Amino acid sequence: MAKGVMIVFSNPVEAGREDDYNEWYTNVHVPELLQLDGFVAARRFRVLDAEPEQRFGAVYELEADDLTSIMDVIGKAVADGNIHMTDAIEMEPPAVVRLCEEL
């Protein structure tokens, strides 16, 4: 089974929505993703050197036969209503997502 991480950088939609964004991310989004096959653990971070670009990061530990299938797993969960999004996350520009395989 392959191991890796998915690194996601994103922002709240506006400064006044940071609390809403963090509440949703920590208490809704991360727990929902951790229920999906392939997701092992998650940690969130505040980016210290990228203002005013992506200000928050999340690192998800992954284990799957095919790490590239993780995005399909997320897409299916969204389509099935098992992942709930919020209007507190900035969509333009979209989050930056990087999928990395452990060497």
Image (tube, rainbow, N blue to C red):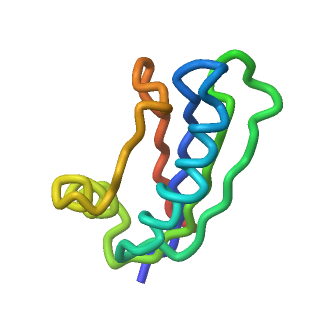
Q: Residue furthest bottom?
A: 1
**What residue lies at 65% left-to-right and 21% top-to-bottom?**
16
Q: Relative to the observer, which residue lies in front, 102 or 14?
A: 14
In this rendering, is residue 56 above or below 102?
Answer: above
In this rendering, is residue 80 above or below 21?
Answer: below
Q: Relative to the observer, which residue lies in front, 79 or 99?
A: 79
Q: Quadrant of residue 85?
A: top left
Q: Is residue 48 left or right of residue 35?
A: right
Residue 87: x %, y % from top left: 41, 31
In this rendering, is residue 39 above or below 47?
Answer: below
**What residue lies at 44% left-to-right and 19% top-to-bottom?**
93
**What residue lies at 82% left-to-right and 32% top-to-bottom?**
48
Residue 18: x %, y % from top left: 65, 31
Q: Is residue 11 left or right of residue 82?
A: right
**What residue lies at 41% left-to-right and 83% top-to-bottom?**
1
The C terminus sits in image quarter: bottom right
Residue 10: x %, y % from top left: 55, 34
Residue 46: x %, y % from top left: 75, 40
Q: Relative to the observer, which residue lies in front, 55 or 24?
A: 24
